[in-house]
Amino acid sequence: MLYLYLGFLLTQSHSVITVIYNANIPLLTIVFSIVVFLTWSLFPVLGYALGRGVTHLLNIKSDCNKYVLFALGCSISLIEQTLFHFEVLSLKNEYSAMLITSALFFSAAFITRNRKQP
């Protein structure tokens, strides 16, 4: 789950760094903003943890390696940013964006590779 979070964080951090860099705010406010950003971006990723719990209950083998999880985190973040860019979601609908992103992370827990081992 760490690599999924890092991939999500990497693509989300571009806009946050841009805003913080251009703002004329005190250092303590910058630190607080970064802590809030790290905490707030963790909530959608918890959908993956919920999905992993469901896969264990249903005995579904989900076997994504760290590279796939990192790519999924980046991809889901880019999907969220695309929805905001094309105004499918607005800043007023922040909770619905979080629910959509959490649902994407939840569905990522069910990705399996059905390869036969020799």
Image (cartoon, rainbow, N blue to C red):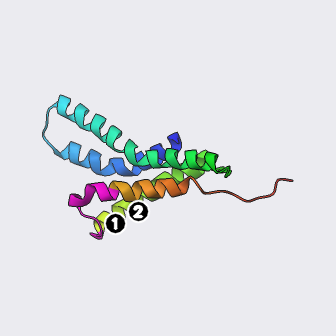
Kind of residue indicated by mark 1: Leu
- In front here: 112 or 82? 112
- Residue drawn at x 59%, y 56% as measured from the top left: 110
Quarter of the view holding residue 112: bottom right
**Number of residues whose C-alpha sits closer than 10 Å to that of mark 2, classed few (under 14), some (14–19) or many (20 or more):** some
- Is residue 12 rendered to the left or right of residue 111? left
Residue located beneath label 1 in the image: 83
Q: Residue furthest front?
A: 57
Query: Quick one: 30 or 60, which is closer to the camera?
Result: 60
Residue 93, by quadrant, is bottom left
> Is 95 in the magenta?
yes
Residue 10, position as x, y percentages in the image: 41, 47
Q: Which mark is residue 53?
A: none
Indicate the position of residue 80 as horizontal and vertical percent values: 37, 60
Stretch of the chain drawn in magenta: 86-97
> Disc 2 to disc 1, how far (Cα)?
6 Å
Report which quarter residue 96 is drawn in.
Answer: bottom left
Where is mark 2, residue-wise?
79
22 vs 85: above or below? above
Could you tell me which residue is drawn at 15 percent across and 44 percent down? 23
Residue 77 visible from this viewpoint: no
Q: Residue at x 42, y 53 (%)?
A: 102
Q: Regarding mark 2 in the picture, which secondary structure is present there?
A: helix
Q: Are marks 2 and 1 in contact (CB under 8 Å)?
A: yes
